[in-house]
Image (tube, coloured by chain):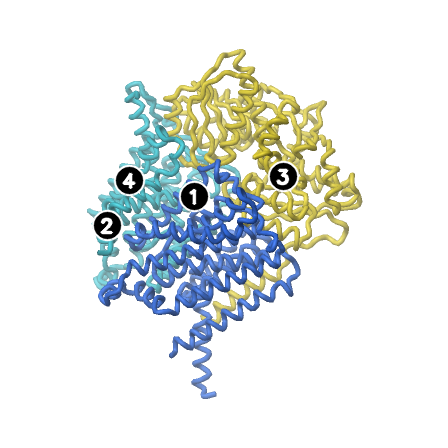
Chain colours: A blue, B yellow, C cyan
Amino acid sequence: MESNKRGWTTQWAGIAVLALFALLPLVKTSDYQLTVANNVLLWAVFAMSFNMLFGVTGMLSFGQALYFGFGAYSVGLFAYYQGTWWFLPALFLGMAGSGILALLIGPLVLRLTGVYFTMLTLAFAQLGWGIVVKWYDFTNGDDGIQGIMPPAALSNKVVYYYFCLVLVSVSVWFLWRISRSPFGLMLRCIRQNPSRVRFLGRRVKRNQLRIYVISAVFTALAGGLMAGVDNSVHTGMWYWTTSGEVILMSILGGMGQFFGPFVGAAIMILIEDMVGARTEFWSMVIGIVMLTMVILLPKGVVGELVQLKERLFKRSSALGV
Amino acid sequence: MQRNSWSVFLAVVVALAVLPSHVWAQEKVIKIGAIYPMTGRAGLYGMDSVAAMEMAMEEINAKGGVAGYKLDALSTDSKVKPDYSVRIAKRYIEEDKVHFLFGVVSSGVGLAVTEVSKQYKKIFIGTDHAATELTVDNFQPYYFRVSNNTFQSMAAGAIYLKELQAQKPWKRIAYIGPDYAYGHSQWNELRYCLDRLGVQYEVAGEHWPKLAQPDYTPFITTIMKDKPDILVSGFWGGDTVAFIKQAIPYGLLKNVLYFHPDAGGNYELMSSMGDELPDGLVLSARHHNNWPDTELNRKFVGDFFKRTGRYPSYAAEGAYAGVYAIAYAVEKVGNPDDADALVKALEGMKLKLPEDPEGFTSYMDPDTHQIVQMQAIGVTMPNADFPPAKKMLGNWKIYKAEDLLPPKEYIEMKRKK
Amino acid sequence: MDPSFLVIQGISGLTMAMILFLVASGLTLLFGVVNVFNFAHGSFYMLGAYFAYTFVSILGFNFWVSLLLAGVAAGAFGMLMEMLFLRRIYGRAEEAGFQILLTYSFILIIDDLVKMVWGTEYKSLQRPDGFSGSVELLGMVLPSYNLAIIVLGLLVAVGSWLVLSRTRGGRIARATAIDREMLSTLGVNVPLTLSLTFGIATALGGVAGALAAPLRSVTPGAGIEVIIDSLIVVVLGGMGNFWGALLGSLIIGEVTAFAVAFVPDWASLFSFLVMIVVLIFKPEGLFSPAKVRRA
């Protein structure tokens, strides 16, 4: 009952946030704000699908950049070699390809747990990065690919923004449904006690593989859409620092909360832009902000907010109002 | 505790949102949006560039500015990340309404930013990144580069090697360079130029350590096994220092001619290695503190020293040239707003720069938007005029600017691809 | 193939391995005893190099003394970090995640501190007197400083092992890894043990940086460049296993050295390939007996 109520609040909060994003093009003062908002949305999807592994199922993957890069480069390469008409098909091909790649790599990495799982995911992602950097003739190596344009119908910035927003909303809704479904509950059980899940006659690995693939598919979607925001892709998208970034976003926002990674992504991107614009010592400032938040907000931003709300709610009911 | 933590968090957010990033002066201003790395290993290049950029702007503003405008600039740390730099560029154009995009040390970042410049039709002045692609394969009309690219360095290098072969026959040539586009294109361009000059040679190994590889010993011992006559190096920055330091005790640099024509002769190598730097390395860079010995160069180097307390690396002169290029164009057009007229003006630009010897003036090649400059290749030798360096380059060989441009058929071949 | 080339290449790999081991040994100690993943370990490596530069080039100290001082300074910095910040998150739910975030924030802060104190110019340290040249052995040229690194690395390995296995302090540290609560009921000051271990581990990182400084360039951002390689080494050897870390370093060092010689185009990918192969066939690392695999 309690959790159901919480579920409703989260759902309404999510709808409200997405509605705010939908209003942005009407109130913006410059296209740059759209770019930033688009970055927030796409990194949010990336971080949320990562958190389905990490916060929900308890698998800390350090290799999600593999699928992000895969999604981005399938759009980038198709658009580069075949023309912009291929932008949309490539987006979906990238998602499918990522899913297949995850199906192949998943059984290998899922044999391990804990830090060993983490490091093996890192190794596969770095291998992917190495191949993209090395395969100069096909991928342009470190130069990346530029001039990736969405098809004519989406070429307007506002239209492309709404296009992204719709896909992001659908993804968020889908991930939300998963997280509230019996399957999502199973994943939570796997995080807390895998052997008990096994005693109950459920298969741990099959469920883990399922969510690993789902996460990869949505990560690829975020990567592919990002190619259209920047109109370029680059090898850094495959690099371990990219995987690291979503980890930071999830913890910062609160990995125990469904919208935690969303908020974490927004905070990271906004702080990066705001601090970067004002001081060359951005790294010190961001470091101190992070440090303060870790010490003072142990549940992540969203987690603490929820707690604050609950406390206020309890207090008022105690007063008998 | 709980409430406290929230108020701290909110205070930080509010402070960040309210603090203005930059207040433009009220008068008529030419706004430059500079993107440079200011942290990490490339940080030195960015800091030197920003210092030289500010120096050039102050010089021009002190003389009353250009066409009634003062110069002013924003600068942001690129973190050497292309996607982040794209965001900075868009912020500059849409929020800060800059007239020019400026800077960039990494070619990967340069290629991403030139895409933004093309879409928004905002002129992008490239000051330090060297990938030839920007002016050849990925050429777009709003991009201009005011420092030499790798092709020009390698063309000069190839002529040097050809002349050397006439005096002291060499045959075996090996290459070591960072394993990314910059490292690879140098080697391809050098071989293209050597072939074009009809030089006979034999490749004795290619080595691709990753960028910022900490340890080169296995590469050094492998190179020694291959016994090349000449070792061409394509490193930049700290990698050059580390490689040379590790190679010294093996005696590699005594048996093999170390040849590093694009970024090897940068001042930071001399300043950080002091007298540990061996004599007789053949190096060049996009600007030298002790060549050419002209009034303009002496003044540039001296002023930079007065300003920062250190001598400039080559990145500084590129940024300095960039500001003067902007001033040149605005002077010609009369305002900084008409991008297409500014492009026309820059295409016909002639500019006397610190790195121009007597009797030569740098000019813009209208076909590629690449500045055309002389290149000097020197040899390390004792010279304590620019401390903390104990060695500088000398024994210069000077190459004519026109001989260093990529030939028409090369450009056509690349652009077709 | 000239057999002496194989030996020379092997020794090249050994130098690489030893510095890697010095960084990784601290990291593995932290995993084993404090149960902390110190993402910022590379930053202590960088700090060590800058401290050594300051002691030698600015204060004019002897190189070997500076090496020691650099270790002490880096260790003191590490202890401070543990006592002021890390200590606050021990035992928190989802501690591992917060460790990553907290130590990552230290990478960011230390990076800028270094920039503020030492600037962005490259610093360089000369090899100590008597170690600037090379020795010739059976027709092979071997730089004496590289040999010194190899010897020192082995000394640190043996020394740390002796301390951990033969002294009271070492026994306490190992016990801390197993059961903190029990130890504190026995009257051991566990927080102090943890801080000291943290100090020693970061000191090892600092010494590694100082020792590497004469061979490498001392630049900002050097910390992030060593962390992934040392993490690979730690995992290869089995987390928290000292000898495992040594073996892991030797494998990575030698594989890289021979990959450079024989498959130069792909040399940079080999450390990851090795890790994939090892983890697929021996998921718990080469040395650790702990059960990691699920049945």
Q: Which residue is mark 3?
A: B126
Quarter location, residue A313: bottom left
Q: Chain of mark 2?
A: C
- Label 1: element kind: helix
CB within 8 Å, label 3 to label 2: no
Give me the C-alpha separation between circle 2 and circle 4. 15 Å
x, y (%) of residue C204? 34, 44
- Label 2: element kind: helix
CB within 8 Å, label 3 to label 4: no
x, y (%) of residue C165? 20, 47
| Labels 1 and 3 within one chain | no
Per the rendering, the mark at residue C170 is 2
Give me the C-alpha separation between circle 3 and circle 2. 57 Å
Q: Chain of mark 1?
A: A
Q: Chain of mark 3?
A: B
Give me the C-alpha separation between circle 1 and circle 3. 28 Å
Quarter location, residue B142: top right
Of circles 1 and 3, the one toward us is: 1
Q: Residues within 10 Å of mark 3 (few under 14, many from 20)?
A: many
x, y (%) of residue B218? 36, 30
Going by the numbered disc 4, the residue's amino acid type is Val
Of circles 2 and 1, the one toward us is: 1
Q: Which residue is mark 1?
A: A129
Q: Residue sitting at 41 percent across and 60 percent down?
A: A51
Q: Is residue B169 above or below residue B269?
A: above
Q: Which residue is mark 4?
A: C156
Q: Residue sitting at 39 percent across and 31 percent down?
A: C264
x, y (%) of residue B208? 43, 32
